[in-house]
Structure formats: structure tokens, C-alpha cells
Image (cartoon, grey):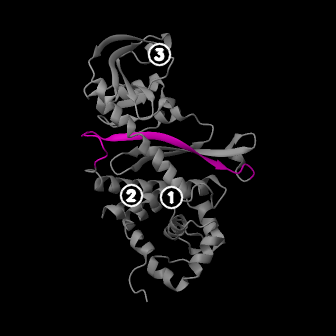
Amino acid sequence: MHVGKFVFAQIMEYLPRHEFDACVRRYGGHRRPRGFSCRDQFLCLAFGQLTFRESLRDIETCLRAVESKLYHVGFRGRVSRSTLADANRAHDWRIFADFAQVLIARARTLYSADKFGVALEHTAYALDSTTIDLCLNLFPCAKFRRRKGAVKLHTLLDLRGNIPCFIRITHGKTHDVTVLDHLPTEAGAFYMMDRGYIDFARLFKLTMHAAFFVTRSKKNMDYTRRSYRAVDKVTGLRSDQTIALAGAKSALQYPELLRRICYYDAEHDRRFVFLTNNFSLPAQVIADLYRCRWQVELFLKWIKQNLRIKAFYGTSENAVKSQVWVAVSVYVLLAMSNAS
């Protein structure tokens, strides 16, 4: 007979109660519909994420099957489908968004010395997005195509520990590059992104904030070469050039010099051309940094396969965002428990 703590209770022990209550008070979540608190709501949604429950009724059925043990896990209100649905509508999703940031800050501290394959003292981030399909009949406000609804999940991943430190949920039609306007910029940090994020005016803002970026060049980019550095072609490098943009519009948007690095991947027979505003790191390190960008795609694939964000328990915008942020919190809690 099991006499120790449940696994779910052990994971929830990493919840900082004081910080959670502060987030609840900040957005008026202390007003409890039917006596169901924000903490009870968080526990229910977290349970649904960890056990991949299909619906609110599914969550209710599973939890009521062990009702005598719920108090020891942390529940204080009575779990029911209607009460949880009311909480998803009433409790502001920003409660869970702010609390996720609290967990993220703690997790990043735990993984601050973690290695990610590149000898780099600076913080390195990878940026990407994924589209989450929605039923247009249930989510008419998220119309993406003629018969399809969708939202986008933009994620900035700290490569030390693969912790998502910035997440933005937008309409499915939102262009990826617009997320750069909302990105928290850290001086001295590296931001890896694919060519879909190339907007020289926005990239120049990163340079003005003393941040570095590494991205792939577009094939039709107009530029002039100013100088070049010798490279060891045995490593796959083909060229390392200092360039200036020559296009009438792009030259105005990014008036400073850029670094253009050409790399050949013999294993996959592919040629890559990288753009960066960093001139001090070796060209091989720049190529390795961009290769690490794949981690954000693996992260987005993992959460879509292992957490409940492809189908939602509620149809309101508040319910959708609450579920996504609880899913992020669950991921970070698992990372924290793994680091301990």
C-alpha cells in the first residue's frame, strides 16, 4: 500500500505559494466563484496537462475517483466541471502568465550554469513560433483561413536549460516578425532566429540595444562586400565577409555593417548563409549557435505532443490563454524538479 506522497503532490511542492497569492491579488482573483480558488483551478488544469485529460468532465471524473485524497494533494474546493468552467471564464489569464514568469525566473537560476553545446559566456536565446489549429465553429474570433481557425504561440527559449522565457499568444494571421516589437532585449545576449524574422529596421533596434542576432540570409539580399577573413574550409566554412546592405530601403533601415558567413553542411549536402552583427566570435561558433536554434523547434514539438495545448477545455480567449500558461508552468515545474 502506497504511504508516501503522490507524484502530483511532489511536483506541486515546487509552487511558491506566496508568489502565487501575489499574482492572484494583483488581478482580483481572490474573489472565488462558488468557493473555487485560483489555486484549485491551477491544480485542476495542471492535472489535466500531466495526465492528458480530454475535457473538463474527464478531469472531474478522474479527480472525484480519488476524492478522499484530494486534500492531501492541495485541493480545497470541490471539483466539478461547471465550477471549473466558470473559473476559466472568470479568473484573469494574466494571473497564470505572471506566475509562469515567477517559475521561469527560478528555473533559469537553476540552469544558469548549464551547457548547451557552444562555449559561450553570454546568454543565448532561440526564437520561433508554432501554429495551433482551432475549430472555427467553436472559436469564430480566431479565423485563420476560410474553414480554419488558429492562434500562434511565439516562444523565446533560453538555451541553458531550454526554458521558455518569453511567450506571446497572437492571432494565427500575425506575421512572425512582428513579435520582435515585443521581445525583451538583453544587452550582450544572442538571439537566434530563422530568415522569417528578417526585418532590418527591427534588427537594427537589437543592435542599438547592444544585443546580437544570428539569422539566415535571404537569397535575393542586395549587398556589397567591404572585407573578408580567411576560413578553414575543412570545418565546412566557405567564407567570412563584412558587408554593407546596398538596397535602397534596407540600407536606410540598417546603416551599419553586417557579417555574412557561408557554411556547407556535407552531411546533409546543404549550404547555409548566416547574417550576424557580431564581429568578435569565430565564424565556426556563429554557425554552431545557429544550429542550436533547433532546440526551440524541439521544445514546441514536445509541448504539442506531451501537453494539452492542441485542444482546449474552454472556447473563450481567457480560457485558452489560461490553459496555455498553465501548460508552460507545468513544463517549467518539471524542469525544476529534474534539476533538483
- Judging by the rendered image, the residue that carries numbered circle 2 is 103
SS state under label 1:
helix
Q: At 38% from the left edge and 26% from the top edge, which residue is drawn?
A: 263
Point out the tag, 3 or 1, that comes first from the N-terminus: 3
Q: Distance between the residues labelled 1 and 2?
A: 12 Å
| Quadrant showing the C terminus | bottom left
Residue 250's disc number: 3
Within 10 angstroms of label 1, few (less than 14), some, or many (20 or more) residues? many
Identify residue type, mark 2.
Answer: Leu
Q: Quadrant of residue 64?
A: bottom right
| Quadrant showing the N terminus | bottom left
Identify residue type, mark 1.
Answer: Ala
Is 130 colored magenta in this rendering? yes
Is 286 colored magenta in this rendering? no
Point out the tag, 1 or 2, that comes first from the N-terminus: 2
Which range of residues does the magenta coloring cover? 115-137
Point out the tag, 2 or 3, that comes first from the N-terminus: 2
Task: Tell me: residue 267, above or below residue 253.
Answer: below
Task: Tell me: residue 230, above or below residue 290.
Answer: above
Q: CB of mark 3 within 8 Å of CB of mark 1?
A: no
- Judging by the rendered image, the residue that carries numbered circle 1 is 327
Answer left or right for 223 relative to 64: left
Q: Quadrant of residue 186?
A: top left
Identify residue type, mark 3.
Answer: Ser
Q: Which of 38 and 189 is in front in this view?
A: 189
Q: Quadrant of residue 77?
A: bottom right
Task: Tell me: residue 278, above or below residue 229.
Answer: below
Dot in front, 1 or 2: 1
